[in-house]
Amino acid sequence: MLLEIEDIHVHYGKIAALKGVSVEVDEGEVVTLIGANGAGKTTTLKTISGLRPLTSGSIRFDGKDISKVPGHRRVLMGIGQSPEGRGIFPGMTVVENLQMGAYARRDQAAKDLEEVYELFPRLAERKNQAGGTMSGGEQQMLAIGRALMTKPRVLLLDEPSMGLAPKLIQQIFEIITEINRRGTTVLLVEQNAQQALQVAHRAYVLETGSVVKSAEASELLNDPQVRAAYLGGGAEAAAGPGD
Ligand SMILES: Nc1ncnc2c1ncn2[C@@H]1O[C@H](COP(=O)(O)OP(=O)(O)OP(=O)(O)O)[C@@H](O)[C@H]1O
């Protein structure tokens, strides 16, 4: 197992955001966390990347307990994150933003830059434009590209479709599939459960800080409760028109 999150509890002051969450991600998988606002999805990703401390529980990466490893070392170990709200450097150009992702390593960075440009031709076209003047969708691509420049073994993606037009949403999900096909494991947090379940192999449903369900993504797509709560439809929607 590449990533093993076991029974983690995380607090913001006295507020318990995660109450015993366990999630496993195997090498090569796309795993998604779905759930309503405030369920704890972002907190789970932040805890894996080391931005939030654990109250209890453990996180193992490639067999090693990383619960106490600082965030910047987790990046070097192969945990890359594209944060919610993007977090790019607005005053730096596209190419400078991408190079920031590789600042800790000099090996292969030029080749990786070419690969990012291949995945996101728009970033190549705009490489000298200031990051802050890129459109929302372009900034999302830049944030993912920068995370890829850290050469992650697992890429943590927080709401990559947030605020994007439908056509771009489609494109972002196609790119996630392609990133995975090229060998990167992906842990994806999404409000857009329908699309997330379509690209993922497995999924976990979070409710108020706990995992309430986990299964193959295809199974959850047809689960009446999941459909009613997260996919904007009940059993009728699952059965299709005319039934
Ligand atoms: N900085 C913070 N201070 C206090 N409480 C917080 C903070 N960040 C998150 N929380 C609380 O922790 C819980 C989990 O939040 P989290 O952002 O992980 O949810 P989420 O599932 O990612 O939601 P969304 O889909 O709305 O982003 C929520 O109750 C939230 O209000």
Image (cartoon, helix red, strand yellow):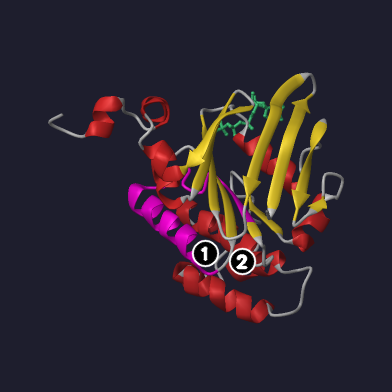
Find residue 174 and report its horizontal and vertical position in percent: 41, 59
Q: What amino acid is labelled 2 in the image?
A: Thr
> Bounds of the magenta span?
155-182
Q: Residue at x 59, y 28 (%)?
A: 39
| The C terminus - image quarter | top left
Q: Quadrant of residue 74?
A: bottom right
Other residues around mark 1 within 10 Å, as few (<14) / some (14–19) / many (≥20): some
- Say if residue 200 shows up in the picture: yes
> Ligand 1 sits in which quadrant?
top right
Q: Indicate left or right for 94 with 119 as reference.
A: right
Identify the disc placed on residue 93.
2
Q: What amino acid is labelled 1 in the image?
A: Ile
Mark 2 or 1, closer to the camera: 1
Which element type, helix, strand or loop, lies under badge 1? helix
Which element type, helix, strand or loop, lies under badge 2? loop
Q: Is residue 7 shown in magenta?
A: no
Q: Residue at x 62, y 75 (%)?
A: 112
- Say if residue 127 shows up in the picture: no
Q: Quadrant of residue 192?
A: top left
Q: Which residue is mark 1?
A: 179
Q: Which circle's residue, 2 or 1, is located before the other in the chain?
A: 2
Q: Is residue 166 shown in magenta?
A: yes
Find residue 164 and report its horizontal and vertical position in percent: 42, 47
- Give the Cα separation between the discs numbered 2 and 1: 23 Å
Q: Residue at x 52, y 64 (%)?
A: 179
Q: Indicate left or right for 152 with 70 as reference.
A: left
Asked whether 141 or 73 is in front, the reply is: 73
As displayed, is residue 20 above or below residue 185? above
Find residue 26 and report its horizontal and vertical position in percent: 62, 54
Q: Residue at x 28, y 33 (%)?
A: 238
Asked whether 102 or 53 is in front, the reply is: 53
Identify the disc placed on residue 150.
none
